Image: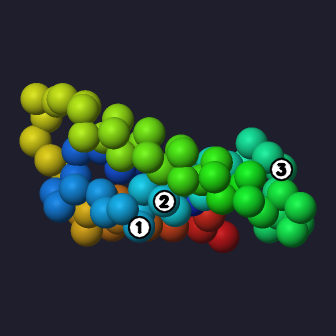
Amino acid sequence: MCRNIRNLHNFEPPATGEEIRASALQYVRKISGLNKPSAANAEAFERAVDAVAEVSARLLGELVTNAPPKNREVEAAKARARAAQRFAA
């Protein structure tokens, strides 16, 4: 489940609200142990996702680095190459 949580810091262009929310959703799913909450837990689950997304966006906005921004396409290509080597049959 947590493999879908991606590093969102120091990319050009910066992470979108949608990317931040997707990572927050994966985090809440992981810690709750629920992929899809029941109707009784849906409201609490959504509040948690909203709260984690809000705090994550604030964190990303406040982080400072001297490193040059990473390129999403280059990083994705590197990840694909690592996966191909790792899972080569």
> Residue tagged by mark 1?
18
In the picture, measured across the screen, residue 86 lies left or right of residue 89, that is left
Q: CA distance from mark 2 to mark 1?
A: 5 Å
Q: Is residue 71 above or below residue 63?
A: below
Q: Residues within 10 Å of mark 3 (few under 14, many from 20)?
A: few
Q: Residues within 10 Å of mark 1 (few under 14, many from 20)?
A: few
- Amino acid type indicated by mark 3: Gly
Q: Is residue 63 above or below residue 23?
A: above
Regarding residue 3, the answer to whether it shows in the image is no
Could you say where residue 17 lies in the image, as x and y percent from the top left?
A: 36, 62
Q: Which corner quadrant of the image does residue 74 belong to?
A: bottom left
In the picture, measured across the screen, residue 1 lies left or right of residue 49, that is right
Residue depicted at x 60% and y 67%: 88
Mark 3 and mark 1 residues within 8 Å of each other at the beta carbon: no
Q: How is the structure coloured here?
A: rainbow
Residue depicted at x 30% and y 57%: 15
In the picture, measured across the screen, residue 54 lies left or right of residue 83, that is left
Secondary-structure class at tag 3: loop
> Residue tagged by mark 3?
33
Q: Earlier in the sequence, mark 3 or mark 1?
A: 1
Could you say where residue 23 lies in the image, as x and y percent from the top left?
A: 52, 55
Mark 2 and mark 1 residues within 8 Å of each other at the beta carbon: yes
In the picture, measured across the screen, residue 44 lies left or right of residue 41, that is left
- Amino acid type indicated by mark 2: Arg
Q: Which corner quadrant of the image does residue 19 belong to?
A: bottom left
Mark identifier at residue 50: none
Could you say where residue 26 lies in the image, as x and y percent from the top left?
A: 62, 56
Q: Earlier in the sequence, mark 2 or mark 3?
A: 2
In this view, the residue in front, 81 or 51, is 51
Q: On the rendered image, what quadrant is the N terminus found in?
A: bottom right
Mark identifier at residue 21: 2
